[in-house]
Image: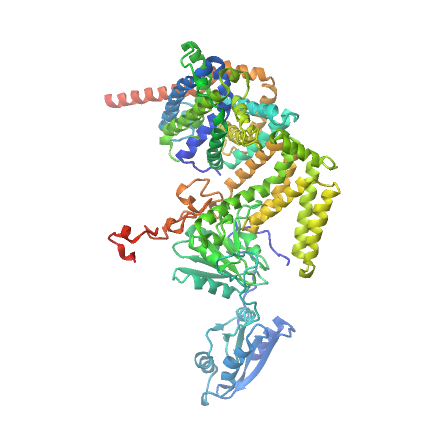
Amino acid sequence: MNGKIGTTQAAMLVVTTVLPTAIVILPQIIGEYVEQDSVIAIIPPTLAGLGIAFVIGSVIRFSNGAPFLDWIREKSSPVISVLLGLLLLLFYLDTSSTILREFVNFVKDNVLLKTPVAVIATLILLISIYMVRKGIEVMARVNSLVILLFLFFVPLYLSGLWGEMNIHRLLPLFDHSAASLLLASLTPSTWMSEVAVLLFLAPYLRSPQKARLIGYLGLLFVSLMMLFSIITILMVLGPQYIKLTTYPGFSAASIIQIGRFIENLDVLFISYWVMAIYLKFAIFLFATVECFKQTFRVSSSRPFIAALGLVIVMECLYTWKDQAELNLYNKEGRFLVFILFNAILPLAVLLVVKLRRSRHKRKECET
Amino acid sequence: MNKKSSAQGPGQDAPTHSVPAPQPLSVSLEANVQEISKRIGESSDVVFRHFTNESLSSSPLAFIYIDGLVNSEMVNQTVLQPLMETVVPKIPDITATDAYNLVKDQMLPIGSVKEGKTLESLLGMLFDGYTLILFNGMTTALAADTAGWEKRSINEPTSQGVIRGPKEGFTENLRTGTAMLRRRLKTSDLRIEEYKIGERTQTGVALVYLEGIASAEVLKEIRRRLNAIQTDSILESNYIEEFIQDGGLTPFPTIQNTERPDALAGGILEGQVGIIIDGTPFALLAPSTFFNFFQSSEDYYQRYDISSFLRLIRYSAFFVSMLLPALYIAVTTFHQEMLPTTLLVSLAAQREGVPFPALAEALLMELTFDVLREAGVRMPRTIGPAISIVGALVLGQSAVQAGLVSAAMVIVVSFTAISNFVIPSLAIANSIRLIRFIMMLIAATLGLFGIMSFLMVLLIHMAGLRSFGVPYLSPVAPMTPRYLKDIFIRVPLWDMTIRPKTNLGKETRRQGKHQKPEPAKKLQKPEGENTP
């Protein structure tokens, strides 16, 4: 079932890996620190993300699309690969459950106010398991369709809000200290670092040599969309109001009015967003399963998808019960964990490989 | 219509069922005739006739044919007459072999004469309308093609009408079907492969394709699946369709059917493979993607702008037909804030006296419509008008007046029903009739979120579906932008220069370059023979 995916499809998967939650959660987190300077605060995370994409892409180039942990096992020892695998598995289980929790919280807060959380979480999980079982090729196809739909929503959003926009709300620029800019860009960087999911998509890339390009393309598109979203939200709502709303993007969309008969379009945007976040969760579930498969060297991961899903849903239901805790984690804890697993770990692997290679070369020269 | 072995999927190779070994003819004419009449039994339509012709041989000969399957006039003129009249001078010591050759080579003024050595092959030909000629002392018999049974003449297709375009449709006759195709595709590349499928029905099935344009992999796969069919009867093309189509338990069709020879020819020209089945006017086209079901042959018979517009309408109708009742339920039960106040107030006022929740109301009306529709199909023509009165007045107007359903719901259900008929392919229109009910149930429990979730499931399902190796949603997902010229819109014919590849085969050019009609001056190019 798992065919190969092309470069554009993979770049689109990267977009879906980062964008759906970023576009909903980040404007408020950034806005809290730097208000109208949010526009500038996107630039450092983008650069950081591109750096991480470079590292990840290089690792994939070295391994030439071989499964990451198998490759490490080959290069070093089984012990290291299993240890790394366990750590990464923990990380991906954690991340998937936070994504699921964010999704569930959102649905609970906005759409299904009375439905029990467990029902929503299980439903989402079941659908995502179905998606993962169909394989990465099918996910990539659905993903490209969902991104295509974007072309329909952007003009609607823009034209609907045109009258509400006030460019003066973007001013004054550079009003905040470098320290707060840095603080504001920490959390977005963790989102950008999610490009590291490519490590586990690598075996399915048609041309793994282009992994860097995939990362760059995906992240640049994400940054552009983030810029677009933040600028429009700022122009419509103004910096002060953003801090008060949980989901500023949808608040802005709810202002859209077509004539005097269509209003409260946020439901439409939410519906669209639901499709995107399904994909995001499925991608992480896929990475988790892939990580599990490589760590424990199972030949077929299909029987384990549901089991891993169960772990994720349990963690989602019990560890992240408290939304404030999740917000705190997003704001403070997330950065360390994500940078450790998504940036430092691959970087260390890359450095070790490079060092060994140069030593090999030197030895060869000496002999 | 019992299927003796319907469980065999296309995954199996050579058929394994036990066929009795063919029985060769005996030397004795009488023994052969006895055996044939024993096999056929006391059937009144089988005509056995013994005769002798002195000029051929002193021993008797026999004809066997089935009345009703043969053209009697033809039998009389081309078989009986030449054989029973003495046309050659008497040859003194004529052997059975000489007589046989003489008859075969000189005395049968008829197009197709075959030889049969076994009882089974002879019986097969007998049921195809051949007249058998048996000789005493020979272990081979002759079969002359005298087929000519009563058949329906070519009529306008009833299920796929067009305003502009050819008005003839396939008939139940396989040969007429292949002939209609040949008349449209006068190229030596057209291939017609015939199969006999069904142990008891021996239904003729013709695989038609263009050599070099249809993908070899697809052809191989279709042949393999056709050969793997083990059933005792094929009565309609759907039998074949269910045996060979991919997807297993999918509500979506992965094979098209058409009653129109021009549509079949169009499909074949785009690289699809046609399957014409004897006994039904509906031919099949495979592989088919989701978007094929929204193309009508009329799209190419009228201007591209209106065709494109109609295409878009069809896609919207598809979504309306699938989603409208569900959306109505979701919006009125969960997301009232989406509606503007005035509309909401008017809806609320309408629903005030209605005793049912929105879901029950919608289910009731949808089921009623499906009952009406089924009744309309089954009912004798003469009672037709009665149903429209019952449907329109009693169930629509009176139900609203009685306060059983709201007027808005009647509008929703009727619009849904009408939208369903906009989709040119009945196969895909039917598939969403069931999905609509699931959608309604989900909308009533989980609202818009549920609808989106289920749409996601459908999307994943469709993205994973294949028709003979071709992804069901291609060329949209996976995306091939240059093949999108005939999907959501139809670009002018002169711009469709390449034939979209349906599988791993090569894409081929179907039109010359620079086909756009332009004033003569612009065409001053080296190969400018086209200039008027």
Residue at left offset 44%, top offset 81%: B106
Figure check: B63 above or below B485 = below
How was this image coloured? Answer: rainbow
Count the marks: how many?
Answer: 0
Q: How far across and how far down the image is residue B383, in percent?
A: 70, 59
Q: In the rendered view of the protein, which quadrant contains the C terminus of chain B?
A: bottom left
Figure check: B491 above or below A78 = below
The part of the image, by quadrant, that contains residue A316 is: top right
Figure check: B458 above or below A310 = below
Q: In the rendered view of the protein, which quadrant contains the N terminus of chain B?
A: bottom right
Can see residue B446? no
Can see residue A188? yes
Q: How far across and how far down the image is residue B19, in percent?
A: 56, 62
Q: How far across and how far down the image is residue B109, in percent?
A: 46, 79
Q: Is residue B489 left or right of residue B386?
A: left
Residue at left offset 52%, top offset 17%: A241
Q: How far across and how far down the image is residue A172, in percent?
A: 42, 14
Of B360 and A236, the residue lying toward us: A236
Of A124 and A175, the residue lying toward us: A175
The part of the image, by quadrant, that contains residue B88 is: bottom left
Of A274 and B316, the residue lying toward us: B316
